[in-house]
Structures are given as structure tokens and as C-alpha cells.
Amino acid sequence: MAPAARQTKKFTYDLIRDERDIEAGLKIAREGVKKGEFHWIFVDDFSLYASFLEGELRDMSAANSESKQPDGRRYWPEYKQRLLNVVGRLFDLKTHIIFASHYIEASQEIKGQRPKSGQGIMPMIGGSAREELPARFQDVLFMEKEKDRRVFQVNPEGIWGPGCRNVDGTHTIDADFGQYFDLMRQGQKLVKLPRKKE
């Protein structure tokens, strides 16, 4: 966010590295919305926070076990509960809430393992949380670079990965949340917008 902060002072940001940081960020967000200072909150990148949290809980489960080995039966439920808690607390705020999560091609799944990618799967999130988190969101967009500009792939059913242009109902718009919010405020379905002239 530092390059954006050099362009404008109309927003504030902080880095989230651990539980204290996320709690401090939630407090600032809550107070800023209440005072009318924040009109939207952008959590970037939620997958990095999730990765930190997974590691911390895994290490705690190992430290608290007799074998000193991680115990997924203990830390996965806690992991999911904490992630859903953060999302729920932010969604309680009366403002736009946007979460970003990076995308990588999923490694091959082990037989019987939960899917790592596909319709309704949040990328780079561990355990059953990757299936439960997306159900909390009203819209799911996919951002990618198209030549010299960034674009959103949008679809009423949500976009869950690259190569989504060919899915029925998918449209491309400039990666501009203002433009996207305008569409939503107008109560329009996602429609194909004319390209801006270069």
C-alpha cells in the first residue's frame, strides 16, 4: 500500500502480522466507520493473514502435545473459527468490506482431501474454511492483468480462478471498485461495459 499512500492521503493502512495486529485493525476500522471517516475497508491480503494464523496455531498445538507434533484435530477447528470471526466482525460494520486473497494453482489433492480450487473455493485458505468463507460474500471477482491494465472478471455466480472469461455470464470491467460500486448502486445486473478508449 505504500505506493498508493504516496499518491493520496485519503486512506490509512497498517500491516497485519499477528493476532494483536488484526485486533488493532478491527478496532480502528470499527471506530473509523462509526465516525464516518471510512466508507470502505480493504483487507489485503487475507490469505497472508490466514497463512500466519495456520502456522501459529499449528505450532501451539505441537507445543501443547506430549509428542510435540502438531495435531490437526485441535488447530483446524480453531483456525476456521478465528477466520470466520474476523470476517463476521468486519461484515457487521455498515460500510463496504472487500477482502483480497492471492491465487496460485493448487497442488494435487490427496485422495479424500477437500478440494483446493474450483467453484466456491477461496484460494490459499486451509481446511474447510476455504469452502465456508466464500459463502459469506455477496460477490466474488477475479482480478488479472490484461496487456497494460488490470481488470476485474465479474459474473453473478462468482469468479473462482483464471480462464473464467469463457464462462457464461462473465464480463470484464476495469479494476475500479468505484465503477463496480456504481453498477451495484444502480441495481443493475452485471453488464458488459464499453471499453475505455486508449
Image (spheres, rainbow, N blue to C red):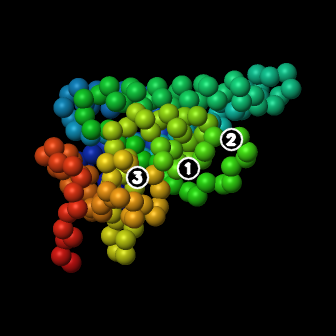
Is the C terminus in the top left, top right, bottom left or bottom right quadrant? bottom left
Q: Position of residue 196 (x, y in %)?
A: 19, 71
Task: Tell me the crowding category of disc 3: few under 14, some 14 to 19, or many 20 or more residues within 10 angstroms, Cα based.
Answer: many
Q: In the figure, 195 relative to 39: above or below? A: below
Instruction: Check the image and name the residue furthest to the front.
Output: 168
Location of mark 2 (residue): 113
- Residue at the image point whose x is 43% and y is 35% from the top: 135
Disc 1 marks a residue whose amino acid type is Ser
- Residue at the image point whose x is 33% and y is 70% from the top: 149
Q: Name the side, left or right, on which 53 lies relative to 184.
A: right
Task: Tell me the crowding category of disc 2: few under 14, some 14 to 19, or many 20 or more residues within 10 angstroms, Cα based.
Answer: few
Location of mark 3 (residue): 159
Disc 3 marks a residue whose amino acid type is Ile
Which label belongs to residue 117?
A: 1
Q: Secondary structure at mark 3?
A: loop
Residue 165 seen = yes
The residue nearer to you, when weighing 116 against 11, is 116
Q: Position of residue 125 (x, y in %)?
A: 56, 42
Disc 2 marks a residue whose amino acid type is Gln
Q: Quadrant of residue 27?
A: top left
First of labels 3, 1 by sequence position: 1
Q: Secondary structure at mark 2?
A: loop
Q: In the figure, 189 relative to 35: above or below? A: below
